[in-house]
Amino acid sequence: MKKVINLTNSPNIACYSQAVEDGGFIFTTGIVPIDPVTGEIFNGDVRVQTELILTNLENLLKQAGCSLKNVVKTTVFMTDLTQFAEMNAVYSTFFKTNPPARTTVQVAALAKGSSVEIEAIAKK
């Protein structure tokens, strides 16, 4: 049975669920670097954006009853793949051992002018 998961007091910038649990899996929306308190987008460098996104992902998964260790697949969307090394340096600090499968793609634009967006699938 489908269960919707949203962070408490977290802003929602469009019509979507932040995560959905179904069949033992957690499917997250694409997460952009939004301050979870103010709802403001952070348009700083790729490293800081990636850190904020993965921290928000970690908190969302915690709300769902699991952690980053449960992530089996991520998709990273970037507006500039020449900044891949910077994103990857931060990403690797969150997934130190047995990282999930990952796809990284360059896109023309992301919501709210973000440079990075990450979605994830986790197995409970």
Image (spheres, rainbow, N blue to C red):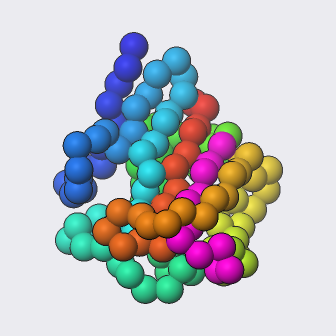
Looking at the image, the residue that sits furthest to the bottom is 44
The residue at 63%/59% (across/down) is 105
Q: Position of residue 114 (x, y in %)?
A: 41, 72
Q: In this image, 115 relative to 10: left or right? A: right
Looking at the image, the residue that sits furthest to the front is 108
Residue 49 in the image: above or below residue 68: below
The residue at 38%/20% (across/down) is 2
Q: In this image, 97 relative to 65: left or right? A: right
The residue at 49%/61% (across/down) is 117
Residue 71 in the image: above or below residue 97: above
82 in magenta: yes
Q: Position of residue 43 (x, y in %)?
A: 38, 81
Q: Which range of residues does the magenta coloring cover?
A: 73-83
- Quadrant of the rendered image containing residue 11: bottom left
Is residue 29 at all visible to an observer of this figure? yes
Q: Nearer the viewer, residue 6 or 103?
A: 103
Is residue 58 at all visible to an observer of this figure? no
Question: What quarter of the picture does the C terminus occupy?
Answer: top right
93 in magenta: no
Q: Nearer the viewer, residue 41 or 69?
A: 41
Q: In this image, 42 relative to 92: left or right? A: left
Q: Position of residue 96 (x, y in %)?
A: 75, 62
Instruction: Report the number of discs.
Output: 0
- Quadrant of the rendered image containing residue 52: bottom left
Q: Position of residue 29 (x, y in %)?
A: 42, 45
